Every structure is written in C-alpha cells, then in structure tokens.
Amino acid sequence: MIRRNAHAGAQAWPRRRAAAFFACLERTCPHPVTELNYQTPFQLLAAVLLSAQSTDREVNRATAELFQVAPTPASLLALGTDRVEAHLRRLGLFRVKTRHLLESSRLLLERFDGRIPSSREDLQELPGIGRKSANVILNALYGASTIAVDTHVFRVANRTGLAPGPTPHAVEKALLRIVPERYLTRAHHWLVLHGRYVCRARSPDCPTCVVSHLCFFPDKTPGDRKPPSRGAIRSG
Ligand code: SF4
C-alpha cells in the first residue's frame, strides 16, 4: 500500500547527497536486477502485469508453470481463459489479471507483431500496464532512464527524505531531478531491494543500513538487534 509520509512536501535532497546515497548502494550491490523470473521480453511484460498487489515470489511461483505451457502471446491465447486462470489462481485479482494478460497478448499480436513496444504510450495502451509497469519494462528491456515508483521506492524516498512526495508520480519526478545520470538506470532496483530487505515497512534494519548516515528518518531502529541476511538480494 502507498502511504503518505511526514516528509511529503519537503524538498528533495541536493544531487550531491543523492549521489552519496546511491554510491553506498552501488558498493553493496553493483549490478541490481529484478527478482521477477523471465526468459523473453514478453514474459517480463507478463510478469510485471501479474505483479500488481502480489509479491515477486508469488508471481514467480505462478509463472514457473504458466511459461512452461504458454511462453508466448499466441500460446497464452490458445490456452484460453479457464486454463490461464487455473495457473494464476493463487495470485490476488487473478481473474482481472487473466483478462488483462489475454487482452494484452491479443493486442501485442495485432498491433506489434508479438513484440514489446518501446514507447510509453504504446505500453500504457495495454490492459494492466500503467505508468509504473511501463517504467519497469522500458528500463529492463530498453535501458531507459525510468524510475518505477512502487510501494518500496515510495517508502524509502519519503522515509529517508531523499525525494519526498505525496504521490508515486511526484516521487518519480523528484527522483528524476536528483539522481545522477550514472545511477539512473539502476536506481529503481536499488530502492526496491533496499526497501524490501533493509528499509522494510514495519521494521527497518537501521543498525546495518549502509545509508543510515545520510537518512533523515527520525525513528531509526536501535542497534541491539540481530543483523538481517543480505543474501537474498540478487545481483546480476
Ligand atoms: S537508516 Fe533505517 S530508515 Fe533510514 S534508510 Fe536505513 S533502514 Fe531505512
């Protein structure tokens, strides 16, 4: 869930401070990658579409079987609604997601010869693909300097004071203003991973946080707790 934060309305950090923040995250994980599993551009789009209000782990469990039997838009359409729903049944909103996935597959075949478009406008015409999903796809497939603001990015940007904003779009615009060019294509991944494993919603691990010295969060957790495992963070 996207929550408002006490920092909303405050100024984003200066670029130099933002550069120091991302330099710390880069040292920890130089080549961050998405935790969604996919083999092809279409499978990335499908996984991103399915990830709304589901964890990457849940999506990966569902797509592991689905992509075995239907790895392309055409094979998904051939599978049909009932069988696609059966694969996605454990995901929230699985009926809506099935409908969006099948309709997006049909449009990709009709308008783009089965390929994934490289423009935001074309992507956002696909059912189930909004601004955040388009940013993820443009970044992962085309190396675009986009920053998708999900619940983790929104929380970290507001909690630290890095790029405060009342809405995901406001945070995205603030981040795009202050993140130095060299970090732009990786910034989304770092913020997601940092929010998922360290700066967690309920129990941020401030004692082991590599950007603690920069963070403005007034309620940092004390240093008497067991350090978390960082092993789950994937780096490509
Ligand atoms: S110090 Fe704590 S609140 Fe600040 S970024 Fe690190 S984990 Fe999050």
Image: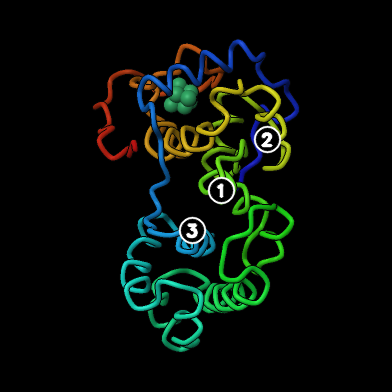
Q: What amino acid is labelled 3 in the image? A: Pro
Identify the residue at image location x=64%, y=68%: 112
> Disc 1 vs disc 3: which is toward the camera?
3
Write down the residue under mark 2: 171
Where is residue 121 drawn, in percent x and y?
A: 74, 56
Identify the residue at image location x=43%, y=23%: 25
Q: Nearer the viewer, residue 223 or 15?
A: 15
Marks 2/1: CA distance? Answer: 15 Å
Residue at disc 3, CB closer than 8 Å to ligand 1:
no
Whether residue 220 appears in this view of the structure is no
Write down the residue under mark 3: 41
Q: Quadrant of the C terminus?
A: top left
Q: Is residue 199 left or right of residue 118?
A: left
Marks 3/2: CA distance? Answer: 27 Å
Query: Is 69 drawn above or below residue 59 in the view shown?
Result: below
Residue at disc 1, CB closer than 8 Å to ligand 1:
no
Q: Are marks 1 and 3 in contact (CB under 8 Å)?
A: no
> Disc 2 vs disc 1: which is toward the camera?
1
- Name the disc covering residue 136, or none: 1
Q: Are marks 2 and 1 in contact (CB under 8 Å)?
A: no
Please tell me how crowded label 3 is: few (under 14), some (14-19), or many (20+) other residues with Cα within 10 Å. some
Q: What amino acid is labelled 2 in the image? A: Val
Marks 1/3: CA distance? Answer: 12 Å
Where is residue 212 drawn, in percent x and y?
A: 45, 17
Q: What amino acid is labelled 1 in the image? A: Val
Specify the farthest residue to the front.
113
Among numbered discs 2 and 1, the one appearing first in the sequence: 1
